[in-house]
Amino acid sequence: MSKRARRQHAPAFKAKVALAAIKGEMTLAQLAEHFDVHPNQITQWKSQLQEAAAEVFGPGGGNRTSEPAVDVKTLHAKIGELTLENDFLEGALSKAGLLSAKR
């Protein structure tokens, strides 16, 4: 008898199974057979969903974009630096005759 290799399920799949369990239209055994996962796993996903659901309706819930992932000031500084370099190179190439006047 060989063991089944560990499977990693996508978060969307876990949410789908947990929501089906919360609805209660099918028993855990039926859900386990339908989705091909162990009933204990369904119970665990269901409890995780119920615990995390309160965070969605809490302050700032569901809106994770309130704080940018990157530093905007650093990006603006980099844009300025690159613009300065482009202007310098454009002027130098124009003087050397390597850059046409039309853009």
Image (tube, rainbow, N blue to C red):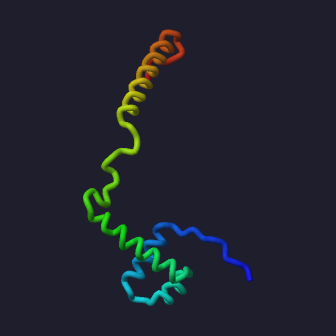
Q: Quadrant of the C terminus?
A: top left
Viewer-side residue, 86 vs 82: 82
Left or right of residue 2: residue 49: left
Farthest right residue in view = 1
Report the residue at 47% width, 72% height from top: 14
Above or below, 99 relative to 52: above
Which residue is found at the position 25% from the left and 58% from the top?
59
**In this view, 62 is above or below 26:** above
List x then y, in percent, for residue 35: 52, 81
Q: Quadrant of residue 78?
A: top left
Query: Residue at (60%, 70%) from the top-left corner?
Result: 7
Q: How many marks?
A: 0
Seen from this angle, which residue lies furthest top? 95
Q: Quadrant of the N terminus?
A: bottom right
The reply, left or right, for residue 37 in relation to residue 73 is: right
Task: From the top left corner, tell me how far across and down residue 60 is, in percent.
Answer: 27, 56
In the image, is 84 to the left or to the right of 33?
Answer: left
* Residue 62 spot, x, y in % from top left: 32, 60
Q: Residue at x 40, y 33 (%)?
A: 75
- The percent position of residue 90, horizontal first and vertical second, equals 46, 18
